[in-house]
Image (spheres, rainbow, N blue to C red):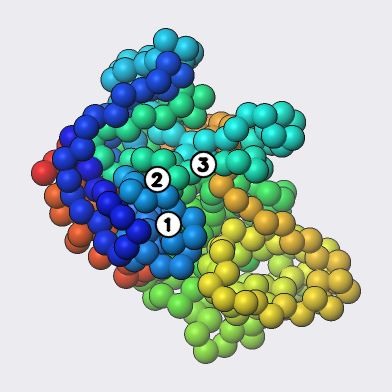
């Protein structure tokens, strides 16, 4: 089978021919139809400090996918040959305190698909049956390939109640854009997105943002001006920090209402200097978000897409580039520009 492969701990990837993996009794074999390119995959290709510290090479990377089940292990239940599926890429131990308490997203021994075990940039992959999400409703392959990052957005957007609340989203990358769409769907009053890319700010408006703020010049003051323009009398009730940019969280803290709640998904690119006095005196809550809740987030996003054509259309529109698998280098280069939506690789085309 064709597979994108990292043969050793060094920059780069190569397209090679690899054996089709053999599933164990508790795994399924999936024919991959689409894969999405994530920031994690860009780190792995560059082989930066994070990749060197977290990734096990040699490896087939990739964790955002949509495919068809072609073989089912003897111990797998509720998954059948022919099912159209996506998958939870965090493989957990099942025996640590958090796993046993039903908090599997907090497992201390998590292994990542495409990070510590072979992933989805290949024509076939294996995955534990317990990690497979079966799409019981018809879904476009490109949307199915977005379920992993959509889960991050839904986990963040539903971390705190947003009905009737004013929401600030810092960082309009694909997951931030999805979070805007989910907050709008879930009943937020005003939603404001911030970024430094004109293209992504335009997409934020398309996702349902009431204002899209370029923070390159004004920073926190530009966000405050947007509040004034919208007629907001107090600060934001809920914030989603999606960028990891060093100025984003301080700007958010400065614009929150007293008692505001912040869900933080963006991994910091450098040390962040926060005015912790404001966090204390304004009684703010900051909650770290990682991955998806297993599997409440999957149920929530599947249900929302099933019942809302508007949300489904918005999420689908975030796929702004598609490439055949053999054009993977162009696909990765397009994703690395950080100026558009999601880039998807089609494994059914050469």
User: 309 above or below 226?
Assistant: above
Pointer 2 local density, CA inside 10 Å: few below 14, some 14–19, many at least 20: many
Whichever of callouts 2 and 1 sits on the residue coming sooner in the sequence is 1
User: Is the N terminus in the top left, top right, bottom left or bottom right quadrant?
Assistant: top left
Sequence order check: which comes first, mark 3 or mark 1?
Answer: 1
Residue at 44%, 34% (x, y): give it: 87
Residue at the spot x=39%, y=45% of the render?
114
Q: Is residue 219 above or below residue 66?
A: below
Nearer to us in this view, 225 or 37: 37
Tell me where residue 204 appears, x and y as whole percent. Answer: 46, 64
Residue that badge 2 annotates: 114
Residue 254 drawn above or below residue 57: below
Task: Check disc 3 and report the residue beneath it.
Answer: 111
In this view, the residue farthest toward the top is 74
Above/below status of 104 relative to 53: above
Q: Please state the horizontal and vertical placement of residue 92, each as a whole percent of the image.
A: 57, 35
Q: Nearer the viewer, residue 303 or 269?
A: 269
């Amino acid at each position: 089978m064709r597979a994108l492969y990292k043969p050793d701990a060094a920059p780069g990837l190569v397209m090679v021919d690899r054996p089709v993996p053999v599933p164990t009794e508790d795994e399924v074999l999936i024919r991959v139809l689409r894969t999405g390119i994530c920031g994690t995959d860009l780190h792995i290709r560059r082989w930066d400090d994070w990749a060197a510290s977290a990734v096990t090479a040699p490896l087939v990377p990739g964790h955002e996918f949509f495919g068809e089940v072609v073989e089912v292990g003897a111990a797998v239940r509720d998954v059948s040959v022919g099912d159209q599926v996506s998958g939870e890429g965090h493989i957990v131990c099942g025996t640590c305190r958090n796993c046993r308490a039903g908090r599997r997203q907090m497992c201390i021994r998590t292994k990542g698909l495409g990070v510590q075990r072979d992933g989805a940039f290949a024509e076939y992959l294996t995955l534990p049956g317990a990690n497979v999400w079966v799409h019981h409703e018809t879904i476009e392959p490109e949307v199915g390939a977005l379920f992993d990052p959509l889960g991050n957005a839904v986990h963040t957007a539903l971390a705190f109640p947003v009905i009737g609340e004013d929401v600030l989203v810092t960082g309009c990358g694909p997951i931030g854009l999805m979070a805007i769409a989910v907050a709008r769907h879930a009943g937020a009053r005003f939603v404001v997105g911030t970024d430094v890319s004109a293209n992504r700010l335009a997409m934020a408006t398309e996702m349902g943002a009431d204002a899209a703020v370029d923070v390159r010049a004004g920073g926190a003051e530009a966000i405050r001006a947007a509040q004034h323009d919208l007629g907001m009398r107090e600060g934001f009730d809920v914030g989603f920090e999606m960028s990891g940019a060093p100025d984003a969280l301080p700007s958010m803290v400065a614009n929150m209402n007293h008692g505001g709640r912040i869900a933080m998904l963006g991994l910091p690119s450098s040390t962040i200097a926060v005015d912790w006095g404001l966090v204390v005196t304004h009684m703010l809550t900051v909650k770290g978000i990682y991955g998806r809740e297993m599997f409440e987030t999957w149920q929530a996003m599947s249900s929302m897409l099933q019942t809302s054509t508007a949300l489904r259309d918005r999420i689908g529109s975030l796929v702004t580039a598609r490439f055949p698998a053999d054009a993977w280098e162009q696909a990765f280069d397009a994703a690395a520009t950080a100026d558009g939506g999601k880039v998807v690789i089609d494994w059914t085309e050469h």
